[in-house]
Amino acid sequence: MTEERQIRLTSWVVTLVLLISGIILLSLPFLAWQWTQTPFSGILFDPNLVVNDSGDASWPAQQGSGAAAFPDRVVAINGIPVSNVADVRAVLSGQRVSSNVPFTIVQPPPETGLSPRFDTPERLKSVFLIPITLGDLWEQFWFFYVTGLIMFGMGIWVFRVRPYAEAAQVFAFAHGLHRPGRGPDL
C-alpha cells in the first residue's frame, strides 16, 4: 500500500469515527431527557453500582443516618436485586416522586482495602425519591455535554483544516472517541 493511499484510508477512518461520534453526541440529550422522567434517588452510581460522591449534599439519600456515600454499593431497591444501572432505572421507573423506597446498601469487602463506613456489612436506607431539577441536570450532564461538544467541534475544525496531517487525524480521532456528557450514571 502506498503512503498516499494509507493517508487517504486513515482520513476516511477518522471521518467515519467523527460521523458516528456526531450521531452519538446528538442522541445524548434524548437519553438525559429519559433520565428526567424517572424518580431520582439522589444517588449517583458508577457502572457497578458503587455510590459516587459527585452528587449534591442536599439530596435526601446523602442525608441523615446511614447516608449513602462512597464506597457503599447498592444491591437491592425495594427488595428487588439490582446489578447494573439499567436495573436501577427499571425499579425506580415503577415508583413515584415523593415516595420512600428502601435501598439495600453493602460495605466494601475487606479484601478491597477500603475502610467500611459502618460496623454492619449491610444496611437498609429509606430514600425519599425526588425529581431531577434543571440545576442538577446542568451540573451532572449539560456542563460535561457542552464541554464535550466544544472539544468535538475543535476536533472537526482541526481535521477540516489539515485532513491529511497526522497530528490533525490523531486529534480528531481522539476527540471523536471522547464520550461527552458521560458523567456518573443517575
Image (cartoon, grey):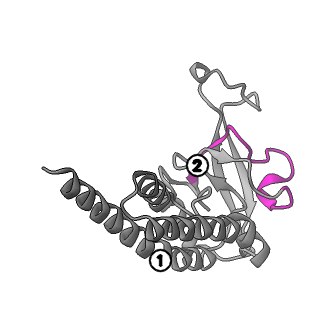
Q: Earlier in the sequence, mark 2 or mark 1?
A: 1
Element on which disc 1 rests: helix
Question: Is residue 5 magenta-colored?
Answer: no
Between residues 173 and 49, which one lies in front from this camera angle? Answer: 173
- Say which quarter of the image contains residue 12: bottom left
Q: Which residue lies furthest to the left in this view?
A: 1
What residue lies at 40% left-to-right and 52% top-to-bottom? 166
x and y, in percent, of residue 126 in the image: 74, 56
Q: Up-down: is 90 above or below 54?
A: below
What residue lies at 80% left-to-right and 53% top-to-bottom? 62
Quadrant for the C terminus in the image? bottom right
* Left or right placement of residue 8 versus residue 90 in this view: left
Give the CA distance from mark 2 to mark 1: 21 Å
Magenta residue span: 57-76
The residue where tag 2 is placed is 46
Element on which disc 2 rests: loop
Q: Up-down: is 168 above or below 142?
A: above
Between residues 132 and 109, which one lies in front from this camera angle? Answer: 132
x and y, in percent, of residue 44 in the image: 66, 56
The residue where tag 1 is placed is 27
* Left or right placement of residue 17 versus residue 1 in this view: right
Principal secondary structure, stretch drawn in magenta: loop
Question: Is residue 60 magenta-colored?
Answer: yes
Disc 1 packing (10 Å; few <14; some 14–19; many ≥20): few
* Left or right placement of residue 147 versus residue 10 in this view: right
Kind of residue at badge 2: Asp
x and y, in percent, of residue 181 in the image: 59, 65
Kind of residue at badge 1: Ser
Q: Up-down: is 65 above or below 90?
A: above
x and y, in percent, of residue 57 in the image: 85, 55
